Amino acid sequence: MNATNSALIVDDERDIRELLVLTLGRMGLRISTAANLAEARELLASNPFDLCLTDMRLPDGNGIELVTEITRDYPRTPVAMITAFGSMDLAVEALKAGAFDFVSKPVDINVLRGLVRHALELNNAARPAPSAPPENATRLLGASAAMDELRGTIAKVARSQAPVYILGESGVGKELVARTIHDQGARAAGPFIPVNCGAIPGELMESEFFGHRKGSFTGAHADKPGLFQAANGGTLFLDEVAELPLQMQVKLLRAIQEKSVRPVGAATEIP
């Protein structure tokens, strides 16, 4: 990130604005603030921004409106939503409208910093060029309205840090969609790790997903990273996740929600 990066903060609470200005300012960004939609629209019309953070509820409207407008009129400005704690439905609505991510109140500063870095990476022309996509990544063919809608959804989702759920019958191309999302996103230069959840032996599942420490069980002669660590900086595609036992599904859910894993035999979690 460089000194020319700029951010727009839209929130009617002065304390939140001051916290965000202080945090982002320390990261080297130039900050503009708005207390409502009208002020935000005026600033957007006269200044280019590398990032926008907007609250959900504003005095003159809804933050979803701003997300939609920025996605449509300023597509090179990633926008993230600030939501009340536990407002997952609203967060999902923001992601559908084009937000690349969301952060809950009270704002976790470390989460916010990671979000900002990712937002700037989305439009960072200096980042390493991704490797050539695999041959099958070019096979998302078809000229129908449904395929056009799918490509549009993929392009929108690829900007997000949120977990993505891909639903479809066997053989419709779920992994191809996952690879396309990976190739179009900021993580394209990282690994793409596909996993057939139904093919992992039950007694090895936790070790395979999260890794293990030396001596944690018979045969654990050395530390071993798991699939989450192997996919770090890239994409982990969990195919047929419903085939996993419920206990393992619960552990996976925690890993996805907390964005950290605990290797078998380890005392602490790893981000």
Image (tube, grey):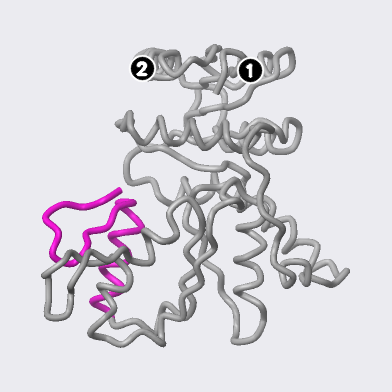
| Number of numbered discs | 2
Local crowd at mark 2 within 10 Å, few (<14), some, or many (≥20)? few
Q: The disc labelled 2 sits on which kind of residue?
A: Leu
Residue 54 appears at what percent x and percent y?
51, 28
Work out whether 263 lies above or below 19. Answer: below
- In magenta segment, residue 253: yes
Local crowd at mark 1 within 10 Å, few (<14), some, or many (≥20)? few
Q: Nearer the viewer, mark 1 or mark 2?
A: 2
Q: Quadrant of residue 135?
A: bottom right
Q: The disc labelled 1 sits on which kind of residue?
A: Ala
Q: What range is drawn magenta here?
A: 246-271
Query: Which corner quadrant holds the N terminus?
Result: top right
Q: Residue furthest front?
A: 221
Residue 150 appears at what percent x and percent y?
72, 64
- Mark linked to residue 11: none
Give 22 or 98, whichever is nearer the viewer. Answer: 22
Residue under numbered circle 2: 19
Work out whether 141 lies above or below 61. Answer: below
Q: Residue at x 53, y 13 (%)?
A: 31
Q: Residue furthest right?
A: 143
Q: Secondary structure at mark 2?
A: helix
Work out whether 58 lies above or below 160. Answer: above
Work out whether 6 lies above or below 98. Answer: above
Q: Earlier in the sequence, mark 1 or mark 2?
A: 2
1 and 2 marks in contact (CB < 8 Å): no
Give 77 or 14, whichever is nearer the viewer. Answer: 77
- Mark linked to residue 38: 1
Q: Residue at x 65, y 68 (%)?
A: 177
Residue 173 appears at what percent x and percent y?
66, 77
